Amino acid sequence: MAIDFKESKTRVNLMRAFAGESQARNRYTFAADTAKKQGLYSVQQVFLFTADQERAHAERYYDLLKNLSGTTIEICGGYPVDHFDGVVELLKKAEHNEMEEADDVYQAFGNEAKTEGFTEAAAAFFQIAEIEAIHARRFRKLAELLEQNKYFESDSSGKWMCMNCGHIQTGKLVPAECPVCRHDRGYFIPVEIAPYLGFDFLMK
């Protein structure tokens, strides 16, 4: 027997997901400010880039609730408080949260939507779960490079891109400032992070 969407668990899960994605967007915007204050401008840009994707996820979930416009959906859920001063800690917590969404939360929501007969919502949960896993790998790689002091230097010859002007720097060490636009070294990002951002072409 078909379940009325107004009475479904799926509508509640969609609202919970909307709330979660909205909060993630804000957390990453705040984290971007922390990275900026510490001179890690390229990490700031990655946080903002990811925040925009979280906004898109929130919009997708919200669109699926359009038929309930004018109503109120009560939700109950646990959401993280990741208020840390260190960029590495922020990245690690972001990775943890993204993997929780990818492996647990959205899988459960997707399965429930499928059981209730809401295939479009189920597809959205499963598709966005895959993206959240990419976010997690992105944050993990950044945290590893910073922790290992390999964000601005390499054991062998490495490549970095200036996020301000696009200059590609090759060598073992990022210069104090970009030789093209003269922006601080904090604007450089290791090219090896490119696949985690979907920019595989930079590796060629």
Image: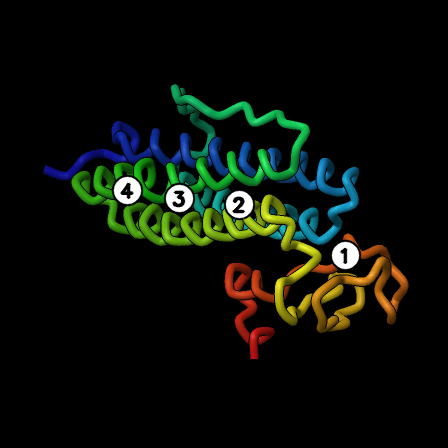
Residue 158 location, x and y as percent? 64, 69
Q: Amino acid at mark 4?
A: Gln
User: Could you tell me which residue is drawn at 19 percent across and 39 percent down?
Assistant: 116
User: Could you tell me which residue is drawn at 48 percent across and 31 percent down?
Assistant: 19
Report the mark closest to the observer, 1 or 3: 1
Residue 65 higher or lower than 183, as above or below:
above
Mark positioned earlier in the residue sequence (1 or 2): 2
Using the numbered discs, state the Cα–Cα distance from disc 1 to disc 4 in whole angstroms.
36 Å
Using the numbered discs, state the Cα–Cα distance from disc 4 to disc 3 in whole angstroms.
17 Å
Q: Amino acid at mark 1?
A: Tyr
Q: Quadrant of the N terminus?
A: top left
Report the mark closest to the observer, 4 or 3: 4
- Proximity of marks 3 and 2: CB atoms separated by less than 8 Å: no
Residue at the disc numbered 3: 64
SS at circle 3: loop
Residue at the disc numbered 2: 54
Report the mark closest to the observer, 3 or 2: 2
Say which mark, if any, is on residue 187.
1
Using the numbered discs, state the Cα–Cα distance from disc 1 to disc 3 in whole angstroms.
38 Å
Residue 25 location, x and y as percent? 58, 39
Residue at the disc numbered 4: 107
* Residue lying furthest right: 182
Using the numbered discs, state the Cα–Cα distance from disc 1 to disc 2 in whole angstroms.
23 Å
Mark positioned earlier in the residue sequence (1 or 3): 3
Using the numbered discs, state the Cα–Cα distance from disc 2 to disc 4 in whole angstroms.
17 Å
User: Could you tell me which residue is drawn at 39 percent across and 42 percent down?
Assistant: 99
Mark positioned earlier in the residue sequence (2 or 4): 2
How many numbered markers are drawn? 4
